[in-house]
Image (cartoon, coloured by chain):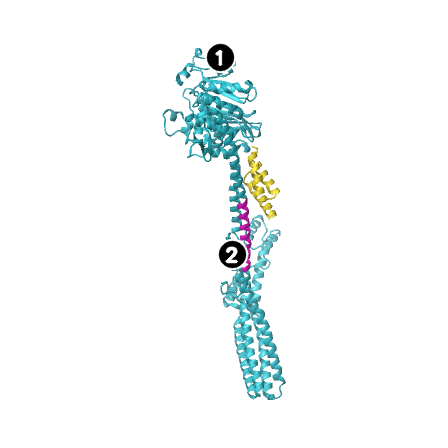
Amino acid sequence: MELKIISWESKGLRCPDGKIILNENGFKRFNFIQMPNATGKTTYLELIQYALSGYLALKDGKTIGDYFNISNQSSNPFFELIVNNNSQIITFRIDFKFDVEAILSKSEINNSKVTYSTSYAEIGGLNPGHRPPNIMKKMLTDEFVKLFVFDGEFANKLFDPADSRAFQCLDSICQLNILDKMELSLDKYWKNQIIESEKSSSAKTKIGIALAIKERDKYETKKKELEKQLIEGEKEIQRISKEISNIDKEIKDDDSLSGNLKNLAQEKKSQCEEYENEYNLFVKDYFELIKNPLNLDQKFIAALDIMQDSLYKLKIPANATRAFFDELVEDKNCICDREMNSQAINSINKNKLKYFDEDRAGIYNSLKTDIRNKLKSKDFDQNILAKKNEEFKRLKEAIETAEADYELANKNLQLSAPANLQQKMEKRGELNNDKNKLMIQLEKIRTNTEENLDITKSIPILNRAIKKQEEKILQIEENMKLRQDIEKIKNICQKIKVNVKKAVKQKIIETCNLQLKNIFAGKKRLQIEDIEEYITLENQSSGSAGQKLAVGILYLSVLLARENVNFFTIFDSPCGAIDLYVRRDLSEPLVELVKKNGQFITFVQSSERLEFTTAIEKKVNINEILHLTVFDKSRFSSKDLPNLPTNKIETENAIFVNDRDFFNNFSPILEKRENI
Amino acid sequence: MALSKELIEAVTLVIDEDKNNEQFKKIFIEYLEQESNFQADEENRFAVINLLRTQIKKNS
């Protein structure tokens, strides 16, 4: 990823009007921009940060108003930054609209506003909004931009235990935020999958699966028990029936019984069987009967009668439908023999709408006929249900009587029978009782509809419950597997982060310390002890402003010198607080750290040239350096300035000089006084 | 932004230590490259998670 500044331009703000171009004869490795105090270095730095991040649009009117320049007012104040991102040219423009009245009166309510616009090849000319290409957008956060557009305050934060800026820098450069994104997505993925599965199951844990298995096994056991009861019951019924049949045969074949009594018992038994058959047929017929609502309630018949009456009252003509009138208007005369004139035709056409069309009339007529046919039918008996109920009652009584008769005949037969036969008959009676009891018991299982799973004897209901638990188990197993997978991938991400941090941190500490050893030699030895949340120094709780600045510059330069990034870096007055010896020593590693195709931009005052820009000049080819001096033209008289070269650019309020000699000889008296 | 040397080394080490297959490693590194070029969104990440899970299943 490469990011370089091509130019920036401003008008009507608290910095010089005009354009600073950094690629006039190709990009330079070192870009020294010399600006006296109060010329607008900090404004430039902030506006570059804001142009990249888009964050000024989120600031309040008062903050925006701070960029207003009373002595440099313009009708269209703006700042425009042009960058090169992997060979794509992108323009970020900020247009200001100042609430001048509020600014001048220092009002708390300030409606100053900014409008962003962006331009690059894909979107054409300037488009409203801060809209960098997607590839760049995610990188241009306020925090990340401050990493390479660096000010002194940022250096302090690197050492502040309450701030974790040092580590954030490390995270950003090591791309560890990539793995954070993956971890967040893993959590979201898990939630999404669970929401999907929640529809069928709510349990997700091992405990959930154990409970579901326990429930399933409980219902399974109960079901098996019931199935066993049915199978064994059927077998038992078959066995008892066979035994009864054998006893019947033995009794029948026994000659010791009285012939009359035996015949009577047989007759009564046959009668019982006949009634039983009749009963079965009756039940079938009865169920057919009650399916017809007409047979169930007299009120239904009465309602149909009323409906039929109402349909008759409608007097729906069988043929005189709307179609009849359509044909009528075609005739010469009406059916009343009057001439069919236009007035009559109009009236008929209007009034025919009151009549049914053919289809609807047909339906109503057919309905009327059906009801009449049904209710007036010879077969229709309004009292059929009452009659059937009566018949049922009689049949039931007849069955009971027949059974009692058979029992009595059997008893008489039994009394007249010899002892061994009596025993057989008693045995047969007992077996019949057992068989009936068993049949009732099995019928109860087969017809059970109890929904309560604790007491149900219904196999279909238990089957449903088992299926539900099995679905739950399957879902829980899937969820558990999903959780394991998620944890596994998360664990990998975390391990990678730990390993990368450890490796990168070690390398950076080593590189920084090697440089620091040369910069702070002898008794002034300064070494980084660790970089956790913040930078800690060896054998000292904190550092001086100069030490912090030097270590901060070095730390960020080392980070930004890594092989996978090539971002421009801007340092604002990097040597203001650093003494001359350290400056010279700091400039050496900087030359090494700035890549051959890098872009190091620094704002300096004339007092910072000594042992900093001059030291770099000695180590770098002169073609690799841009020497630009920018100053407020009204602040200095020409006698205080070195000779201005002809290629200078002069704007409303500033002069821009791209010249090495001018740069190195620029020491205006006013600035010297300020520094003193 | 290209992936740093340390990141690639750490990914290889951790994935190998965790006894995942080569395909898993390839998918993971490709995803990181995509992410480092700011070209991955949530949908891409979900798709990568699905692919990684398939490899975990194959590996088990």
Image mark 2: chain:
A
Label 2 Cα neighbours within 10 Å, binned few <14 / some 14-19 / many ≥20: few
Residue at 49% x, 18% y is: A614
Q: What stretch is highlighted in magenta?
A: A465-488
Q: Residue flagged by tag 2: what amino acid is it?
A: Ala
Chain B drawn colour: yellow
Would you identify the image quadrant in which residue A471 lies?
Answer: bottom right
Q: Where is residue A360 in the image (x, y as percent from the top left)?
A: 57, 56
**Is label 1 in a helix, a strand or a loop?**
loop
Indicate the position of residue A413 as horizontal and vertical percent values. 57, 86
Q: What color was chain A assigned in the picture?
A: cyan
Q: What residue type is labelled 1?
A: Leu
The quadrant of the image that shows the N terminus of chain B is top right
Q: Is the magenta stretch mostly helix, strand or loop?
A: helix
Q: Name the residue under label 1.
A: A644
Query: Observer-nearest residue: A216 or A270?
Result: A216
Q: Does residue B54 belong to the magenta stretch?
A: no
Image mark 1: chain: A
